[in-house]
Every structure is written in structure tokens, then in C-alpha cells.
Amino acid sequence: MDLSSLHAKAVAAHQRGQLADAERLYLQLLAAAPGSFAPLHLLGVVRAQQGRNAEALDLIGQALQISPDTPEVLLNYGNVLKNMCRFDEALASYDRALKVRPGFPDALFNRANALREMKRGGEAVASYDQVLAARPDHEGALVNRGNALHELGREVEALASFDRALALNPNNAETWKNRGITLRVLGRFDEALASFDRALMFRPGNAELLNYRGHALCESDRVVEGFVVFRQSAEQAIGAGSAAPADAPPHRLRHDTEQQAWLGSRARIDGPLFLDGGDKLAGPAINPANTQKVTADWRASNNQLVVIDNLLTPEALANLRRFCLGSNVWRQTYNDGYLGAFPEHGFAAPLLAQIADEFRDTFPAIFGGHPLRYLWAFKYDSSMSGIKIHADEAAVNVNFWITPDEANLDPEHGGLVVWDKAAPLDWDFDKYNGDVESPRKFLKDAGATSVTVPYRANRAVIFDSDLFHETDTIRFKDGYENRRINVTLLYGRRGKG
């Protein structure tokens, strides 16, 4: 076979997605004609598609030495650099391609994608707009433009971009999902649910879509329905089970060994979803005797913080402890020594839905019209630290503890530290929730003071979610049933009162 025919065969295999065949044929071309431009370039593209980015960069770089001004090669070189998170170099390569071929849509599109990954959303939107000026039917540019606008908080514009994309392709589940997320942020929950349902038509039973649908149901005050959907999401995501990865930290492995001993033969910690208890109660879950005092304390608090003892009724507390000890919902690992259980992991028992609804019914002066946004539980390894200083994305934060008091070796600590200064509303999530140094500097400069709420079983701290807070020093007894467990519920949105 002559080289021209071999090249055509290699390209055809590549276009069909037969990467192994294309790779073999490109290597044959290079063996027959070492240093050939097209096989170097295209083998580099194959290597990138195989995730072998360093090799791809070398091969495409060799092709660029032969022909330094070929726009397609500069584009692919930039794409590999972007895959390697070398964004500044990727932008330079895209800009070289655009200098050779002004208005090159693929270079503009990938340049915009790189800018978005660099969190330069305004520039990314401008670059997507340049793509759309030349190609108004560029679905990818419309979708990613919508995503960039959503990340900038420009939800109405994002929605318009998604709608334009769906007019071109109404069968794209990802676009319907993104549209639903945007509508949820806008508080248009019925429309959000309709969008998630359209996405589920194309991806039936998809765990991620079910999870989003559960959130929209909760925020539209349909918490019980939402928790049913969360459980469906967990069952789909976990399936036959998921073992801790081989490189899991020791505290994860210690917990799993302890819980497996607790479960015995009833279930596997790494098996299908298993929920022990957590049923809805016939009577109240939240102790109604607290209502008047808590409401008065909240109204009298300058910083909107109240502490409630004997939060749950005895039956609810016992049932929730059983659920948290026996259910294999502890799927999220954190390096600071704690594990997380979230609704998408099965932390969505009917009892939790009852508790979430009763908070609003029992303390309307605190929760007002704020819907439930999210909830989780954390379980701690006492030999390590807890959660570092942060604020939460909500209006009202509920944090309560369920491990028996006799497990706590230091009764004056083990609870929560809350400062009297709120995170500035112009801070983004990464700054107030993931950056420890900025909050500490802010609090020092503001002359903030803190209050330490000692740990007590069945004690809740309810406060403005914008207030910075962190876990106090933890010293609990060894043993699975002695691990500190806290449950957190978030209501409403930041800046909404």
C-alpha cells in the first residue's frame, strides 16, 4: 500500500474513533517516512484522545517545528496544553492560531473554554460571543456561554443562552440539566423540575439528574418527595456497592472496619445502599416545648444565634442515632479526619424529612419562608481535627449533635466556635468556604469576637449562615459508637434575609 493510501486509511480509522487502529497506521507512516508532518500531528491528536498528554505535546510540537503557522496544529497544541492545565501557554497557542486565521471559530471556542477554566468568565463570554457572531448555530458555544454566565451569577442571560441551544438541539440532556440548575437559582422551581424531567427522558435513572431534581423539590417545599428522589439517586449511584479506594486515608479505613463490625452480617459497608431505621415518627420529632423560648432568644440576639437543648424528642434522637450508626451512607472522605453523608449518598431518611419540615413549623420566626436547601452529617475521628473556619451558602444554618454526652472527654469543648462577623456578600464560595487565611484576616481586621458552644448531645446551634464558624477541639472516647456526629441543615439563600 502506498503512503497516500495508508494515510487515507489511518485518517478514516481516526474519524471512526478507532484510535488503536489509527495509532498503528500513523506509526507505520512515521516508520516509512520519519519526521513527516501530518502523521506527527495526527498521532499527537490520538495520544491526546488517549489521555497521554505529554506524548501528545511532544508529537504536535515536532509538527509545529516543521510548520509553525498551521492554525489546526496550533489549535490542537493549545488543546493539549489546556488539558494539562497550562492555561497561559494554551491561550498563547490559540492566539497564534487566530493571528494566522482571524476569526477561526474552533480557536475562539477553545480559547473561551480555557478562559472559563481560569475563572475569567467575562472574557470567556466575550470569546463565545465572537464564535456566535460567525456561527450563530454553534451549540457548544451557546451551552458553554450559558455555563459561564451562570458562574458569573448572570442567570437570566444564562437561561437565554441555554434556550437558544435547546432550540437547535432539544435532545441534549446536559443542556436541559444546566437550564434546570439556572431556573433553580432563579427560584423558578416548577420550571426547573420540568427541565430536569426532560433531561431524565434522555438519561433515565441518572443519579446526578435525580439529585438535582431532589434539590428542586426540597426548595419548592416538597421535602418528603425530594427525599424519596434522593434515595433513588443514591441507589443508582451506589448500585452494587463501592469500596473505599486503595489509597484511602487511615481514618477512612478505621471507620469502615469499625462500622463493618457494628453491622455484622446485616450488610456490607461497601455493598448496596443499606438504611437502618430513619422511619418517620407518628408523633413530633422536634421537641415542641422549646418553641417560645427559642423564638424569644432569636429575636433578642444581635447576631442571630440561639442554642437549643433537648432539641429532638427521645424517640427521634434514638431513631436518628440508629440510622447514623447502622446505615452505610458515609461515602465522602475528608483529609482533616471526618466523613460525610449527603442526600445523594442516602442520607435522606423519612425521619430527616420530618425533622427538616418541623424546624420551619416549630420556629417560623427563625425560618420564615426559607426552604430547605441542603443537609448532611459529619462523623469524626477524634484523633484528628474537625472542620476549619468557613461560612455556608445559605440564610439559616442548623447544626445539632447526637452522640451521647458520655463519649465526650472534654465537656467544655467539642462543639462549635462561631464569630460575630458575617462573610462579606461579595465574597464567592471558594473564598468564604475554602480559604482559611482570608476569613481569619478579615475577622482580625474587623475586631471580631467568638463564642464557643460546648458539645452536648441533642443540642442545636441555629445561626445566620454567613457567620464564620469552625469545629471546636474534639476529644471523644475511642469506639465506633463514640464518634462525634453532627447533622447540618441549610435553609434559604445567602443575602435573602
Image (tube, grey):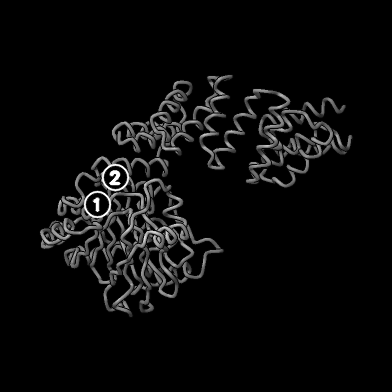
| Labels 2 and 1 touching (C-beta < 8 A) | yes
The x, y position of residue 241, in whole percent, is: 45, 56
Q: How far apart are labels 2 and 1 at the CA level?
A: 9 Å
The x, y position of residue 316, in whole percent, is: 20, 63
Mark 2 residue crowding within 10 angstroms, few (<14) / some (14–19) / many (20+): many
Mark 1 residue crowding within 10 angstroms, few (<14) / some (14–19) / many (20+): many
Q: Residue at x 82, y 31 (%)?
A: 67
Q: Secondary structure at mark 2?
A: helix
Q: Residue at x 55, y 34 (%)?
A: 123
Q: Is residue 257 above or below residue 463?
A: below
Residue with the mark numbered 1: 353
Side of 383 where 192 appears, left or right: left
The x, y position of residue 225, in whole percent, is: 26, 44
The x, y position of residue 360, in whole percent, is: 19, 50
Q: Which mark is residue 99?
A: none
* Amino acid residing under circle 2: Gly
Q: Which mark is residue 226?
A: 2
Q: Camera-side residue: 13 or 163?
A: 163
Q: Camera-side residue: 173 or 68?
A: 68
